[in-house]
Image (cartoon, helix red, strand yellow):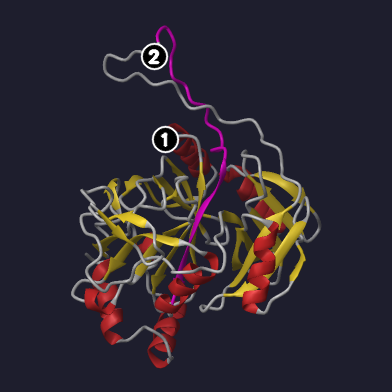
Amino acid sequence: MSETHVDGTAVKTAHQDLHSEQGALRGEHPGRSRNPVIRVTDLAWLEFEKPDLERAEVFARDFGFQVAARTESELWLRGTFAGSPCMVIRRGRTSRFIGPAFRAAERADLDRLARATGSAVRDADVPGGGKVVDLLDPSGFPVRVVHCGEQLPALPEQQPLLLNFGTDHRRTNATQRPPREPSRIQRLGHVVLETRVFARALDWYLDTLGMIVSDFLFLDGQRDRGPTMAFIRCDLGSVPADHHTLAMHLGPGTGYVHSAYQVTDLDSIAAGGEYLKERGYKRSWGIGRHIQGSQLFDYWRDPDHFMLEHFADGDLFSSDVEPGWAPMSTSGLAQWGPPVTRDFLGASPSPQRVRDVIEALRGDNEVDPARLLGLLKAANS
């Protein structure tokens, strides 16, 4: 069964438990824009500032990054896949997340985006060169859209283990001994952000960058007020894309939640996790398998308390898959794995969190007492 969508394309409307028990109700957010300015193809990299680049590099190597370039003031990190670096850390006074950079499909997309937003196209300060348009999303995050010049070559991969399944014996007269070494990062997968202006920020990413929603989450008893979280993918047409390249949720704060980096397989996640644990790093939550996106996951904190995820085996959707709708809850975060931690949820009380709540309730945004109570209920459900 199908129907014509707002942009004139035929889309599937029968979910048949493809990725969510529920689809949209009549009149709910369609999860895509009628006529976006451009359609980005992926995340390019994330930008951070930290005062101690030496310490940042030690963690980066332990987590599984390779160094693409290093100067006195910048550290560019990459995975094994060919392409652009996936993170830049610039020396700064404090540790903070700056914003994401998305990849444009063509150089001409930057001109179209610049005209539509009143911005300029300028040279990108990335190894290999390129062009960039700098924007600001409704949450206040600097967002870059880039078209890179020279691409970094691929590096040697961490090979997946050969597994035996039932009567399918692919490995005989050989043992399994995955080495205790860092998980070798392949690429940047996604970033998750918290915002007080969820609806406005969501529409901006759909209208400006042409992204589309894979799954919406809503608060119990408040579905009529709209979603409070979205898992958003790039629109590559018939080519399947990651279930989410960007995820956003409503909250009292505005900031980075975590970023995720693909590795080879479950053994890479587990052996790399043992390597991190032996070096004294703190696991935030894992190992398990998500529901939205289906990824195998393992979350860690770096020395500056930023959360980073190793993941493998994520869902891939083409553009004809409609958004799913599900209630927001901690029990809905994983199919299996250990209980979700307070650290992962950001539920531990802190002076900054209290200030965030007070600011949000006083400000002109989408956080009100009912929304806040609903978020607290979801965190404990």
CA distance separating discs 2 and 1: 18 Å
Q: Quadrant of residue 368?
A: bottom left
Q: Quadrant of residue 227?
A: bottom left
Q: Which residues are magenta?
A: 172-195
The residue located at (22%, 71%) in the rendering is: 26
Q: In the rendered structure, does residue 317 fall within the stretch colored magenta? A: no
Q: Do the residues bearing badges 2 and 1 touch, measured as CB atoms within 8 Å?
A: no
Judging by the rendered image, the residue that carries numbered circle 2 is 170
Asked if residue 81 is positioned above or below residue 359 in the image, the reply reads above
Would residue 83 be visible to someone looking at this image?
yes
Q: In the rendered structure, does residue 193 fall within the stretch colored magenta? A: yes
| Picture disc at residue 266 | 1
- The answer to which of 286 and 292 lies nearer the viewer is 292
- The answer to which of 26 and 72 lies nearer the viewer is 26
Which quadrant of the figure contains the C terminus?
bottom left
- The answer to which of 261 and 72 lies nearer the viewer is 261
Disc 2 vs disc 1: which is toward the camera?
Answer: 2
Q: Position of residue 4 (x, y in %)?
A: 32, 61
The residue most toward the right is 72
Q: Position of residue 206 (x, y in %)?
A: 47, 68
Q: Position of residue 375 (x, y in %)?
A: 29, 73
What's the amino acid at mark 1?
A: Leu
Describe the element under mark 2 as helix, strand or loop: loop
The residue most toward the top is 173
The residue located at (70%, 45%) in the rendering is: 67
Asked if residue 120 is positioned above or below residue 267 in the image, the reply reads below
